Image (tube, rainbow, N blue to C red):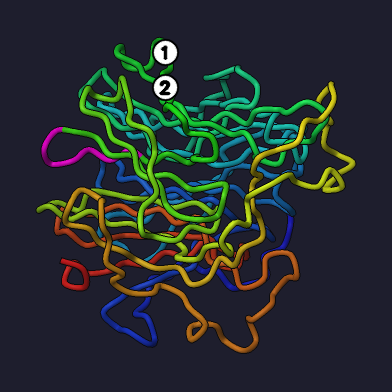
Amino acid sequence: MTTPTVRADGAVRPNAADPDLSEALIPTPCTENHASFLAWLPDGSLGCAWFGGSTEGRPDIYIYFSRLPAGADNWTPPVRVSRDDTRSEQNPVLAALPNGELWALYTSQEYGSQDTAIVVQQRSTDLGATWSEPETLFDTVGTFIRQGVVQLDDKHWLLPVFHCHQLPGRQWHGDADTSAVAITENGGASWSEVEVPDSTGAVHLCIVALDNGELAGFFRSRWADAVYRSASSDEGRTWTVPTALDVPNNNSSIQVTNAGDGVLLMVANPVSAPAESAVGDASLERSDKDKVVAPGEAAPLERHAVWGQPRLPLSLFSSRDAGLTWTRVLDLENESTLGPERDLPRKRSGAEMSYPTVVVDETGDAHISYSYYRDAIKYVRVPRAKFA
């Protein structure tokens, strides 16, 4: 077990700069913690899952789970969910089902290679205290998830996925990734899949049910240019071509939720790469000895994925027009929130505040978690008065 580098005691306290906000660092036994996901559980508690271990991609990366019980001010000690010591388990998604079960879905990959990933499922009937043996949910190699299951009714559910496609003569770097939606109409007994058209580079699709009965989808961009949007008017069976919004994106995850009364919320890093950064070929010298080179001869790329953009600030946005335009409400983290002793906890992650997840409670307050330097998962509660 690795040693965390911050004191994550799970206690919920007022934010020092803005006491209207409350926050906590969720307990963790790990050095690196990333890709958290929040979900409401049947008893009213708030569940959080994330992946942790030494370094992303290594086989000591597992899925962890903690709860904030209803009315409590401390997150529970973490439970380790996954157990494969040979593969890296990442990007957990929680789904509380109508039958009372809690699902944890996540990716399982060979070291460092997203294009080897499959999607795995575990179940809990005791609010995450114990978990079933892992089962393969999707066995198509290169399938990744990040965003939640949308339950349209008791049996008809949508799960966004994206496919990490190999290119001949190259290692995977995300240059050809595309999005799709897995659909079940029998409560998960079987799944089909529909592609999002012309979605190359648009990944991490987050589907939101709108007040008018339609669906909107929001994407991270491999080109590090902007958040993209798509829509469906037939319960997710077909989607429009993703189009760029006037919200920057740094090729890092975002999340959107419906906060009610016509308000959508989004948490994202409003940062983009310089214009035209993705245009042209990508150097074949970006090699990793642990990644496989696909067979064949490499063809020139018209554009390539852009990595390494800053993951600060991390901001909360709101929209009142179904996510077509957005207003920046507040920064959860920015340069002013960084203590001098925390500027560069590790060279690898730097001042990284990323991979947010957001849910809304019955009073309308927003609950957010995100990777805090990757040293811990930070939880923040934002009262509705801040964004309504």
CB contact under 8 Å: marks 1 and 2: yes
Classify residue 214 as left or right of residue 298. Answer: left
Q: Residue furthest right?
A: 289
Which residue is painted at 80% across and 33% down in the image?
170
Which contiguous range is marked in magenta?
207-213
Whether residue 226 is situated above or below residue 342 in the rendered picture = above
Reading the chain from its start, which is encountered first: label 1 or label 2? 2
Image x and y of residue 388, in percent: 15, 66
Classify residue 348 as left or right of residue 272. Answer: right
- Report the disc number at residue 182: 2
Q: Residue 97 colored magenta?
A: no
Front-lying residue, 280 or 18:
280
Amino acid, disc 1: Ser
Classify residue 335 as left or right of residue 207. Answer: right
Q: Which residue is mark 1?
A: 192
Helix, strand or loop for disc 2: strand
Amino acid, disc 2: Ala
Whether residue 189 is situated above or below residue 116 in the rendered picture = above
Helix, strand or loop for disc 1: strand
Which residue is painted at 27% across and 66% down in the image?
327
